Amino acid sequence: MKNKGAALARPGWPEKLIIPYGIDALPPGTGPLSPWPPPPFPCEVIDTGTRNVLRLNNSRHVAGGGGAPASKGAEPFEAIKEQLIGWCGPWNGLSRRFLAHYFAAVEAAIETAREELSRRLVPFEGLFSYRDWRFSAPKPLPRAFLPVPIPEGASPGSADAHIRVEIAFWLGDRLVAVQSEPSPLTPRAAAEQKARLAGAGIACVGFSTADLDTDGALLERILGELWPAFWSGETLPAGPFRPEVPRPF
């Protein structure tokens, strides 16, 4: 299917794409990122060769610096939503509003398709609920650090090799950065950041407060063919919390 959203990114992603998120900055002295041992901050390790979308049901949901699932006692979808909104930080109100908008839109899309999704689950005699398809939604990564080429004359450390964006999505073959407008950066810094992201093959989608009042248009710009039927291609729904099995990558 033709992509309707942000432009496709570069084809040459590393085999293991490592995306730290939920923090203001990488810790001082952080060297090149490695998936093992796990870093002391939220991090996704994406096997780019599979071309799988990073979804709520195939990613890690952990407390910052720990290995425990997010809020085991709470309703899982709400627990994940609240955790990701919290990882936007206390000062970025527009990012927090974007995530609230996103999760509400995911629930609305599921309700709109309730009959179709329930029909697909009839053979399983109550094992699944149509609402379990919510976890097929692409996972937004707040305050995500995305890999970019190191500027000429800069050090090879991770701080120079990454740009922090407000929200990021991995859509199987491309990274999309979602940034609020107007940018909190100076116009010159914002232009330089956007150019570096574009040079890395990372599409940027801007949004304003007004965009959060639209019905699906913003999410279609971000997710393309994955919106609104983000569950397409998924055989069955799956829950978000799975046992953590330590393994060298």
Image: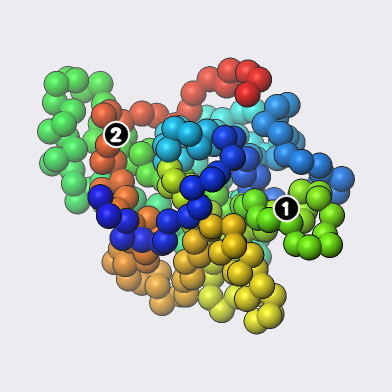
Residue 33: image location, x then y, percent: 73, 39
Residue 212: image location, x then y, percent: 40, 69
Kind of element beneath mark 2: loop
Residue drawn 50% across the image and 65% down it: 204
Residue 84: image location, x then y, percent: 55, 48
The answer to whether residue 74 of the structure is visible from this angle is no
Residue 178: image location, x then y, percent: 51, 62
Cα–Cα gap, marks 2 and 1: 34 Å
* Amino acid type of the residue that numbered disc 2 sits on in the rendered structure: Glu
Name the residue beneath numbered marker 1.
161
Badge 1 crowding class, 10 Å Cα cut-off, few under 14, some 14 to 19, many 20 or more, is some
Up/down of 4 relative to 175, above or below: below
Name the residue beneath numbered marker 2.
234
164 or 50, nearer to the observer = 50
Residue drawn 19% across the image and 38% down it: 117
Badge 2 crowding class, 10 Å Cα cut-off, few under 14, some 14 to 19, many 20 or more, is few
Q: Of all residues shown, which one is farthest toward the right?
A: 29
Say whether disc 2 or disc 1 marks the residue closer to the N-terminus: 1
Up/down of 182 relative to 238, above or below: below
The answer to whether residue 3 of the structure is visible from this angle is yes
